[in-house]
Amino acid sequence: MFKQRPVLVIAGALSFTSLPALAAPLAFQATYSVANSGLTVGETQTSLSYQAAGYTFQKITKANGVAALISGDSLTERSVGLKQGDKLQTQQYLYQHKSRRKAKQDQYQFTSATEIKGKLDQTTYTLKVPKNTIDPALIELRLMEDVAANRPLNYSITERGKLKTYQFQRLGKETITTPLGQYACEKVKMSRDNGERQTTLWLAPELDYVAAQIQHNEKGNITEAQLTRYQAKH
């Protein structure tokens, strides 16, 4: 039977010619095919846009085929914030997961550089955080910036009312083949829970460091998203 988690784990897990150092990511639209155990189970639509001094980064994942018939899963993640020089900084974040059986939502906003106020399902919360804390979706864009500029890949994030630290390691260059073509990529990985959960991204300099492939391995259950469409918005 189809399990709903693999359809959405890529979107939730983590959403890259050469990006100049010390520059925010270029606006883009991308589509990914999501597969689990070799079976296509969903699709993710990703977009980054800019408005004046702000940005909106959105990822929408939906189950398809048999998976859609069984679960009806959909997941929306949206990060809205400011473009401050070469850095993007969260102001508001939305996580909304819907299925036939349940619905989950986490929504919050920064009331200052060190405080957020949010609502997790029906429970409100306030959380003190370090400066430069970001949301889970924005990590993907920070990786694009920081890999291109050869900066450390350490991030303070907040999700589900908790503060967490994510640290990625560089694994060197690797060329991969996707439905959209072959790309020479910078490979990065993050491990959690003593290695039982691993998220790996292949960032393609040819595509302004947009992820050409994302893989999530949870206790040997592998879900993979591969790029099927990409359009830069210069």
Image: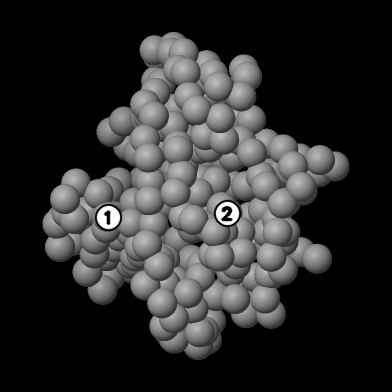
Above or below, 193 against 107 in this view is: below
Q: Residue at point 60% right, 67% down? A: 148
Horizontal and vertical percent position of residue 224 = 34, 66
Element carrying mark 1: strand
Three-letter amino acid code at disc 2?
Leu
- On screen, residue 38 versus residue 108, left or right, reads left
The residue nearer to you, when weighing 85 against 103, is: 85
- On screen, residue 157 versus residue 232, left or right, reads left
Horizontal and vertical percent position of residue 232 = 72, 68
The image quarter in which residue 127 lies:
top left
User: Disc 2 to disc 1, how far (Cα)?
Assistant: 19 Å
Q: Residue at point 49% right, 56% down? A: 152
Q: Give neighbour class at mark 2: few <14, some 14-19, many 20+ (Cα, 10 Å).
A: many
Above or below, 58 against 198 in this view is: above
Above or below, 179 against 109 in this view is: below
In the displayed orientation, state which residue is furthest to the right.
52
The disc placed on residue 191 is: 1
Residue underneath mark 2: 141
The residue nearer to you, when weighing 206 against 177, is: 206
Q: Give neighbour class at mark 1: few <14, some 14-19, many 20+ (Cα, 10 Å).
A: some
Three-letter amino acid code at disc 1?
Ser
